[in-house]
Image (cartoon, rainbow, N blue to C red):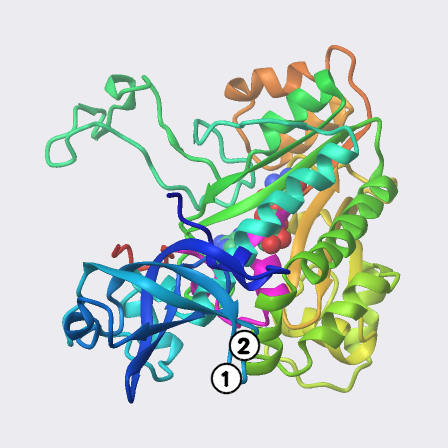
Amino acid sequence: MERTKIFELLNSDDSMEQVLIKGWVRTRRDSKGFSFIEINDGSSLKNIQVVADEKLPNYADVKQLSTGSAIAVGGSLVASQGGGQRWEIQADDVQIIHLAPEDYQLQKKRHTDEFLRTIAHLRPRTNKYGAAFRIRSELAYGIHTFFRERGFRYLHSPILTGSDCEGAGELFRVTTLDLSKPPLKEGKADYAQDFFGTEANLTVSGQLSAEMFALALGDVYTFGPTFRAENSNTRRHAAEFWMVEPEMAFCDLDGNMDLGEELIRELTTYAIDNCADDLELFARWVDKTLMATLENIAQSDYIRLPYREAVDILGQSGKKFEYPVGFGNDLQTEHERFLTEEHFKKPVIVYDYPKSIKPFYMRVNDDGETVGAMDVLVPRIGEIIGGSQREERLEVLEARMEEMKMDKAPMWWYLDARRYGSVPHSGFGLGFERFLMMITGIRNIRDVIPFPRTPQNIEF
Ligand code: 4AD
Ligand code: MG
């Protein structure tokens, strides 16, 4: 007989004669003549209650069942006698697959997020993390659905690259050279003798590949892991994180902002509609204002604000910020949160940033000082999307690369795209973990990644 997922049984309309479930014991409670066993199989937040009668041939063993043990239960699905649940299982057969010893760390009590990070291999078995990672899975599907419905093609951009898209130098080097005695040339490691015959690193963004494919397939998106050796130990930065990067041919900055706004609104709606049970946990235990915040994000029109005006608002706010405000300074989380949480009380798209603080590929505006960049900022998180219209004019792009002292030679293929059929095109990157933080109210990025990688931490 095949096992049924507990989730399906809990949603059943009718009782059932014969069912088989397999899962892990959350609690066992003995009564006179029988025991109640709460079982969870990870298919949903809710457990199912099993009633095990003392007439079971192995009842003596059943009474030893400890939290965390794995069991298989055959029996019938019947309307529950007690309150609190609609259905329960009257067991005919309880097989003990594995008995967990008493030192199992997830006994029934609340644990801190900090402690659970030290047992990241077990934390998905808790209610909170089970819910967080089911939501993560649902939303990954939601992303593919969103783009597929709009005719976007899914592109697998490379993880190993030779370029630094963002130009921030936050690269993880990839090498097979023996680091204790690398071959040398003029006193430096000779990467010509390395695996790829040149320097290589993990990608910080799939954008450059996505641009090439947008100019071939029209509208594309990537969705995959990206890596940054940023040594900032903040609650919203990870060394390995997932990014969703759409890229659209024949699209300007306005169209780009439209898509970014639509993606966040639709995906938030998707979460509200498809993850109701799991979201309820977060609304109850993590952030009481969560559902109101999500409704606001799903329903409002986002503010569109030129960077210069954002700077004016911040300057006139009367607030004491830790970081300086003024043209040419990047916006910090504290500024982004002020704009979204206090000033406008909804998501804000800031655009036309100074070119001095943005990468080489962004389209230079007519003022010569700003570029067609846009960041979508949301309450509690700050920046969730970063994107731009791309520089499609060959001479302007080359001049900008020279100005930034970039080596143009290895970028010949990127420049080629501006030589043959160059068109206005735009795209952005949505940080998937930041989006999950927004959806769940979880405050630390480490808690929305199955096995987070941050400075000084690569355990599990
Ligand atoms: O603003 P960023 O650096 O933009 C790019 O990488 C562009 N190449 C994207 C594009 O236009 N195709 O990063 C995009 C988003 C940020 O807004 C943020 O949500 C997330 O990626 N992000 C991080 N998330 C977690 N940890 C980090 N270290 C992150 N760095 C960026
Ligand atoms: Mg950014």
Residue 179 locus on image (x, y percent): 16, 35
Q: Which residues are magenta?
A: 429-450
Q: Is residue 173 above or below residue 346?
A: above
Instruction: Identify residue for label 2.
Output: 85
Residue 432 among those drawn in magenta:
yes
Residue toward you, 9 or 66: 9
Please tell me which residue is depicted at 77% across the width and 52% down the height of the picture.
266
Q: Disc 1 marks which amino acid?
A: Gly
Residue 71, position as x, y percentages in the image: 27, 60
Residue 396: horizontal and vertical position, in percent?
Answer: 75, 28
Q: Which mark is residue 82?
A: 1
Q: Dot 1 lies on which element?
A: loop
Q: Residue at x 69, y 81 (%)?
A: 289
- Circles 1 and 2, Cβ within 8 Å, touching? The answer is yes
Q: From the viewer's perspective, is the residue at label 1 or at label 2 nearer? A: 1
Image: 264 above or below 40: above
Q: Position of residue 103 (x, y in %)?
A: 15, 75
Disc 2 residue: CB within 8 Å of ligand 1: no
- The N terminus: image quadrant: top left
- Give the position of the C terminus as an image quadrant: bottom left
The residue drawn where x is 48% and y is 27% is: 158
Q: Quadrant of residue 36?
A: bottom left
- The alpha-carbon separation of the residues under discs 1 and 2 comes to 7 Å
